[in-house]
């Protein structure tokens, strides 16, 4: 099973990706998280990616496509995937289609719809676990103990690109670059849209229904 999660920054892709992948018996991968992992390891790609991510703009297609294709082509991921945050440009969508065409292509694209005001509230209050990357929110899904991850007791932090000024740029870039990719999948019959402004559990149920239906 090969599933793509699409939606603007803050729509809830990361919140839903792991449980959806678990249900399907595949692994989830976030392109943003792959970049942050390179940053933590201070690789050349990590340093390059940081210069774009800190400004809220996309990392160039060439390096992004190469990094995600390596993940997809790793034999441990041969059962399929849930992709969170890729593809975000036409070039990325075409590269993905070409790469997995012989395997039957993408089975389902789930688009999570959330209004812009809500995205800003979500992104500016988001906290992430340093250890397991689980997302929390100061008000909407706070951890049981302040500053600490419920799952692994890791420290929670705010991403540099979740500061208010960068958030606005990221939403603009999404509208310019990625909204057309959503339309591209909408024209094929594989896209399903879900209302992302429900409780986390209800969004998850709607997404599961969209994938199996
Ligand atoms: P994305 O991966 O699409 O950028 P996240 O999954 O990280 O989005 O969610 C963004 C923020 O919104 C996080 O702080 C998360 O806790 C919160 N959030 C996610 N889903 C919901 C929801 N259904 N209702 C309220 N807040 C949510
Ligand atoms: P979001 O919460 O916006 O979904 P991500 O963690 O997915 O955040 O992405 C963080 C940043 O990583 C993006 O703003 C962008 O700079 C970079 N990035 C992630 N995925 C891609 C991609 N597919 N193409 C280009 N840049 C990407
Ligand atoms: Zn954790």
Image (spheres, helix red, strand yellow):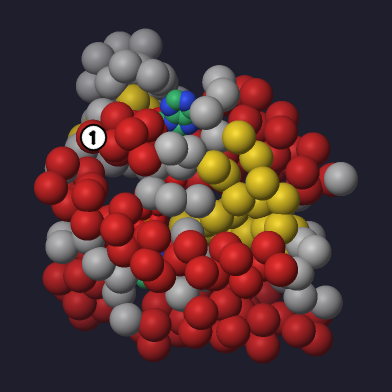
Residue located at (33% from left, 25% from top): 137
SS for dot 1: helix
Instruction: Report x, y in % for residue 118.
Output: 37, 32
Crowding at mark 1 (Cα within 10 Å: few <14, some 14-19, many 20+): many
Left or right of 38? Residue 24 is right
Question: Which of the 4 image quadrants contains residue 78?
Answer: bottom right
Q: Is residue 76 left or right of residue 11?
A: right
Q: Position of residue 182 (x, y in %)?
A: 57, 63
Q: Quadrant of residue 63?
A: bottom left
How many numbered discs, if any?
1
Q: The N terminus appears in which quarter of the rendering?
A: bottom right
Left-right relation of 87 to 127: right
Q: Is residue 55 above or below residue 166?
A: below
Which residue was labeled with disc 1?
124
Q: Residue at x 46, y 81 (%)?
A: 65
Q: Quadrant of ligand 2?
A: bottom left
Ligand 1 under 8 Å from disc 1 Cβ: no
Q: Residue at x 59, y 84 (%)?
A: 94
Rendered view: 84 above or below 20: below
Residue 209 in picture, x, y percent from top left: 79, 38
Q: Which residue is at the far top?
A: 144
Q: Nearer the viewer, residue 30 or 114?
A: 114
Residue at the extreme right: 213
In the picture, the quarter occupied by the C terminus is top right
Whether residue 151 is visible to the viewer of this picture, yes or no, is yes
Is residue 77 visible from the viewing direction of this image? no
Give the camera-side residue of 25 and 7.
7
- The x and y percentages for residue 64 are 40, 77
């Amino acid at each position: 099973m090969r599933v793509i999660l699409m939606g603007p920054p803050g729509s809830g892709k990361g919140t839903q990706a792991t449980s959806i992948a678990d249900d399907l018996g595949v692994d989830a991968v976030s392109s943003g998280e792959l970049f942050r992992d390179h940053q933590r390891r201070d690789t050349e790609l990590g340093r390059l990616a940081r210069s774009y991510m800190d400004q809220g703009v996309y990392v160039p297609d060439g390096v992004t496509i190469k990094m995600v294709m390596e993940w997809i082509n790793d034999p441990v991921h041969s059962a399929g995937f849930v992709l969170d945050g890729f593809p975000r440009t036409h070039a990325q969508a075409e590269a993905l289609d070409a790469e997995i065409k012989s395997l039957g292509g993408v089975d389902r694209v789930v688009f999570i719809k959330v209004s812009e005001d809500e995205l800003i509230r979500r992104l500016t209050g988001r906290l992430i676990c340093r250890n397991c990357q689980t997302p929390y929110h100061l008000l909407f899904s706070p951890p049981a103990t302040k500053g600490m991850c419920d799952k692994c007791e890791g420290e929670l932090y705010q991403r540099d690109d979740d500061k208010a000024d960068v958030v606005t740029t990221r939403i603009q870039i999404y509208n310019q670059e990625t909204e057309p990719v959503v339309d591209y999948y909408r024209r094929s019959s594989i896209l399903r849209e879900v209302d992302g402004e429900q409780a986390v559990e209800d969004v998850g149920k709607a997404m599961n229904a969209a994938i199996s239906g």
